[in-house]
Amino acid sequence: MNDHAAHAHDDAHDVPFLEDGKGWKSWLFTLDHKRIGVMYLWSVLIAFAAGGVFALLLRLELMAPGKQYIEADTYNRFFTLHGAIMVFLFIIPAIPSAMGNFVLPLMLGAKDVAFPRLNLLSFWIYGIGSIMALSSIVFGGVETGWTFYTPYSTNTSGAVVMMTLSVFVLGFSSILTGLNFIVTIHKMRAPGMSFFRMPLFVWATYATSILQVMATPVLGITLLLLVAERTLGIGIFDPALGGDPVLYQHFFWFYSHPAVYIMILPGMGVISEIITVFSRKTIFGYRAIAYSSLGIAIISFLVWGHHMFLSGQSAYAGMVFSFLTFLVAIPSAIKVFNWTATLYKGSISFDAPMMWTLSFMVLFTIGGLTGLFLGALGVDVHLHDTYFVVAHFHYVMMGGTVIAFYAGLHYWWPKMFGVMYREGPAKFSAIIVFIGFNATFFTQFVLGTRGMPRRYYNYLDQYQPLHQFSTFGSWIIGLGFIVMTVNLLASFKQKVKAPANPWGARTLEWSIPSPPITHNFHKTPVVTEGPYDFPVEGQAASGAEGKHA
């Protein structure tokens, strides 16, 4: 892809970033994008573990009708915390802020992001917002659900103000990260790297950054209005004060549907990288995948009303939003088609990142197809606010974003930390999570079609067998993630040194040592080829480092 060699120099600065100052202050005040990415990584993993614990507690309570071990109010607080932690503390920042911070400058051939201090500020803001969100547990908890729907959220007791202000603060972290990435992509690409020589992960991050900058302020303003109504008694959303609760839904989903793609687009970028590397083939339809990322970003602003088919909006508005819902599925379908075409006749290696990637392709496709059911006006009347929606959401968010995150984590782990994990347990964990996921959430599609409403603490006896099966599945998921976590952490003890390019990839981050040196590149690379120009059959496969001279 370029003409740069990553040869070691006897320079005081030519040390891996992990060894460049080991005190906590050197990390907390670092301007190195890689260290900031690693701090984000550990933060979002802790958030994922916390959100996962609440999910397991919820499923345990639903093993049988009636009270098992907690009261209804506590159940409501648990599912609010599960949703809020997973969405705002994990899924939204996981891939852009953690992986994006680490690998995006490396992929561009840059020494850092455009605004290193702004990057550090973004992490600090994320930390402050996370502490505020978790402190709501101490101040009475929140039982509104992660959407904070009015008028309930304006009238109920609890720490609603603290939780909503925490999301407001977290929004600044998202905006600043997106702004930083946009400028970095425009201004800091290596010589010769045109837009159509950028890796597809960079394209996906670029589209995501546009959404972060344009959509997140809408959520911030909406939550400030909610806080103003609770504290000052201003009638904006509360009908008792002359407000309109449906207006809150319009504002919230105008942000939150683009936010769905803030969550999933980076994951799609990860999958595009892994598919081509482990198929040993140039990605099929590079430009179509790149443009589809931008297409998703644009159309996602126009479909918020499909969350509100039963809110009383006009039939004509419903038809328009239904049509746009089907339309936004097309760019995602283009990606799935192109990934499948890339696999076709490829020399596929079933390493751990590829196992997680194939799991993503199955689960995300199911999530996308079931979204079409919910986009159909007549069908949505029956399925609205049932467990069918819960299953669809998790197939897209967990089966999509979370699985893609762990695919990327296994893919870039050697680059991030310079050590290799054991392949056997890594593959096993991917298979176990896949089995447990389908046992948990495919069951919920059946529950939804039979009329089981979402968010309910209690239910009819007829639903108990399916709820129990779903709970058993959640335990399998938990086992899979425990195996994965132990395996990755064990790699630090085993210390099997990672080569610069263990996968034979062609993008720039694999042309330098693992982990990278503090300033990334000894010399600025010059790009002469596309990111996925694998050798044709019969030609020597040199790997990325073979093209950096």
Image: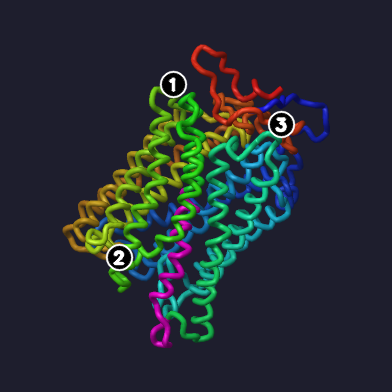
Where in the figure is residue 156, as x and y percent of width and height? 42, 78
Q: Which mark is residue 464?
A: none
Residue type, label 2: Tyr
Does the magenta run of residues contain 310?
Answer: no
Residue where numbered disc 3 is placed: 525
Q: Is residue 436 above or below residue 154?
A: above
Depth check, front residue: 289 or 67: 289
CA separation in Å, label 1 and label 2 = 49 Å
Where in the figure is residue 1, as x and y percent of width and height? 63, 28
Residue where numbered disc 2 is placed: 457
Magenta segment, which residues? 238-264
Q: Please, which residue is most extreme toward the top here?
A: 538
Q: Quadrant of the C terminus?
A: top right
CA separation in Å, label 3 and label 2 = 58 Å
Residue type, label 3: Pro
Q: Is residue 144 visible?
A: yes
Residue type, label 1: Ser
| Count of numbered circles on the image | 3
- Residue at 48% across, 55% down: 298
Neighbour tally class for label 3: few under 14, some 14-19, many 20 plus, Cα within 10 Å: many
